[in-house]
Amino acid sequence: MRLTGKTAIVTGGASGFGAGIVRKFVAEGARVMVVDINEAAAADLAQDLGQSTLACGCDVANGASVGAMAARAIAEMGGVDILVNNAGITHLPKPMETVTEEEFDRVFMVNCKSVYLTAQALVGHMKGRGGAILNVASTAGLSPRPNLNWYNASKGWMITATKTMAVELAPHGLRVNALCPVAGETPLLASFMGEDTPEMRAKFLSTIPLGRFSTPQDMGNAACFLCSDEASMLTGVAMEVDGGRCI
């Protein structure tokens, strides 16, 4: 029960890695707000997990929506100790010059601007109580693959943002870390591969020394450690949860 008495927000929390983090946090004693643009899916997960969770529909790329979410979290949970910026999207694999401006803008709004918006809405509150911020980046930000250029860049941005946030917020008792998963069994897997076929899966898995994808459980375990007091000396870390992919 490493998170007993803690309150947490997990964006993109209704499915995939986010849901794995939510489940682990609840199992470890936290009260969690499941934040997702798919409010119905967030509500279903919250209902499944019981009174330790509440659901909130939110567009993390929209300042007013994020502000309303933050205000509700503070009011209904009595404060926020942990913020997990997990929401993210990608563009389909294609040559960089063929990604449309609309696709580019959407990737950077969801993957990057959302971190600015949640910081704007919550950092002032969290400075007064300490805690942890966790940004979900990607191995794509450390070891980029061709044809995912602008997604790679957005995750590299998140790693740099994590490190500069960590330096600035350390004097206020706030730790900021990142997780860098390899692709996993999430709704984004087919988008990363271009097509979900046995051949493409085998090709992708051949690049991972441990021979499997990241799972929501892997992410939940790593997130729980970094957001717990056990990691009290860790800040500015971009932890690879990738089965050796980046070696």
Image (cartoon, grey):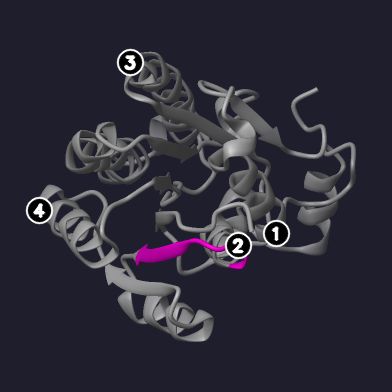
Tell me which numbered mark, 1 or 3, is placed earlier along the sequence.
Answer: 3
Query: Marks 1 and 3: which is nearer the front?
Result: 3
Q: Position of residue 143 (x, y in %)?
A: 65, 24
Q: Which residue is mark 1?
A: 217
Amino acid type at mark 3:
Glu
Instruction: Characterize the local packing of mark 1: few (<14), some (14-19) or many (20 or more) Cα atoms within 10 angstroms.
Output: some
Does the CB distance between marks 2 and 1 fall below 8 Å?
yes
Tell me which numbered mark, 2 or 1, is placed earlier along the sequence.
Answer: 2
What residue is at 74 percent from the left and 38 percent from the top? Answer: 242
Tell me which numbered mark, 3 or 2, is placed earlier along the sequence.
Answer: 2
Q: Is residue 33 magenta?
A: yes
Q: Position of residue 13 (x, y in %)?
A: 45, 62
Mark 2–mark 1 distance (CA, rounded to whole Å): 5 Å
- Residue 139 in the figure: left or right of residue 96: right
Query: Marks 3 and 2: which is nearer the front?
Result: 3
- Circle 3 sits in a helix, a strand or a loop, which is it? helix
- Residue 188 in the figure: left or right of residue 120: right
Amino acid type at mark 4:
Ala
Q: Which residue is mark 2?
A: 20
Dividing the picture into quadrants, the one containing residue 32 is bottom left
Nearest the eye: 5 or 70: 5
What residue is at 45 percent from the left and 29 percent from the top? Answer: 176
Specify the segment rendered in magenta.
27-35
Q: Which residue is mark 4?
A: 64
Q: Is the C terminus in the top left, top right, bottom left or bottom right quadrant? A: top right
- Circle 4 sits in a helix, a strand or a loop, which is it? helix
Q: Is residue 103 above or below residue 232?
A: below
Q: Which residue is mark 3?
A: 168
Q: Is the N terminus in the top left, top right, bottom left or bottom right quadrant? A: bottom right
